[in-house]
Amino acid sequence: MAILEVKDLNFSYEEEGKTIDNVSFSVEEGSYTTIVGHNGSGKSTIAKLIMGLLESASGTITIDGIALNNENLAKIRSRIGIVFQNPDNQFIGATVRDDIAFGLENHCVEPSMMDEIIDTNAALVKMSDFMDQEPTHLSGGQKQRVAIAGVLAMKPKLLIFDEATSMLDPDGKDEIKKVIMKLHKESSLTILSITHDIDEVASSDYVVALDQGKVVLTGTPQEVFQQEKKLKEMKLDIPFSLKIADELKKRGVTVDRCITMEGMVNELCRLRSKM
C-alpha cells in the first residue's frame, strides 16, 4: 500500500520553465525510498511540496490516503516529519532534552508522559548520554541525530530526510546513514530520503531519479545502477563497490557486481576462501 502518491505534479519558481515537470511516483508504506539527482534537479523542491511549504501549479499529492490541500494541511503535517540540511538551523532548545521536548510541548503532550518519550527516542539515535549538553558542544552529526529524535517523538508515519547529510563531514554522514538504516530495519516507519549520496541510494529499497525536474529512472537500486550510461548523462556516479568490481574485471578477476560495500566485502571474502 502506498503511503505517499505523487501524480502529474508541476511547479515553477518563475513564469518561464518548470522546476517540477509532470512528476509522478509513489512510496510504499514501510519502505526506504530515495530520490536522487544532481544539484538543481528538483529534489528539495519535491520535499517542500510534499510538506505543503510550496503549492503546486497542478497535480496531486496524497499522504496516508489524504489529499494535500489547505483544508487538510494540519492532518498531513501530523503524519509526516522532516529533517533538513543544516543541523545548526534546526536546534531550538537550550539542551538536547529541551530540543526533543519542543514538539511535544507544542502538541500539548502531558508532562508526566514526556520524559519517557524523550528518553526512548534519544536512545534510538544514541544520544542518551548527551541530554543536558548545549548544542554548541555537539558535532554536526550529533545535532542531526537530535533533530531526528525530535521528529520521531512526534510519531510520524512518513519521515523525510532532505539532504540531511550534505553539510556533514564524512564521520557525520556515516552516523546519520547508520541511524537511517537502523530505523528502516527496526521499525515500520516509512523513510523518504532526498539525497545525492549514491552509497545511500544503494542501501534503499526503491529509487526515483530526477533530472531537470523530470522523473528519468525508477526501480530498485540494482535496476537503476544498470543504467550507467543514463546516470552519467545525469551527472550521477555509481557506487564505489561497482567501481571495484569493474576494476577487478579489467585485471582478470570476475566478481558479482554488488551495489553495497558490505556485499562487495562478502563477495571478496567468498572468493578468497576458494583460493
Image (cartoon, rainbow, N blue to C red):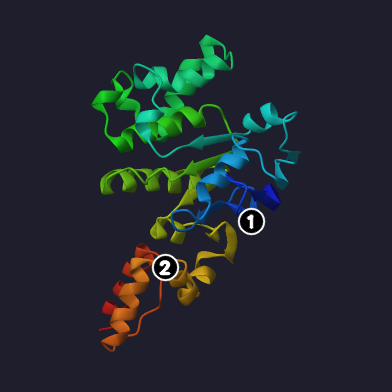
Q: Quadrant of residue 206?
A: bottom right
| Cα gap from disc 1 to disc 2, whole angstroms | 30 Å
Regarding residue 267, the answer to whether it shows in the image is: no
Tell me the residue at 42%/65% (across/down).
236
**Viewer-closest of 70 and 223:** 70
Q: Is residue 203 above or below residue 65?
A: below
Q: Is residue 204 above or below residue 233?
A: above
Task: Please state the horizontal and vertical placement of residue 83, each as a whole percent of the image.
Answer: 47, 37
Q: Which amino acid type is shown beneath numbered disc 2?
A: Ile
The reply, left or right, for residue 170 in relation to residue 49 is left
Task: Say which mark, if any, is on residue 259.
Answer: 2
Task: Please state the horizontal and vertical placement of residue 247, each as a whole percent of the image.
Answer: 29, 80
Task: Please state the horizontal and vertical placement of residue 124, each as a whole percent of the image.
Answer: 42, 34
The quadrant in which the C terminus is found is bottom left
Q: Is residue 33 above or below residue 133?
A: below
Task: Say which mark, if any, is on residue 113.
Answer: none
Task: Say which mark, if any, is on residue 21.
Answer: 1
The reply, left or right, for residue 134 in relation to residue 147 is left
**Viewer-closest of 178 and 103:** 103
The reply, left or right, for residue 12 in relation to residue 94 is right
Q: Is residue 212 above or below residue 275?
A: above
Task: Please state the horizontal and vertical placement of residue 86, each as a whole percent of the image.
Answer: 38, 36
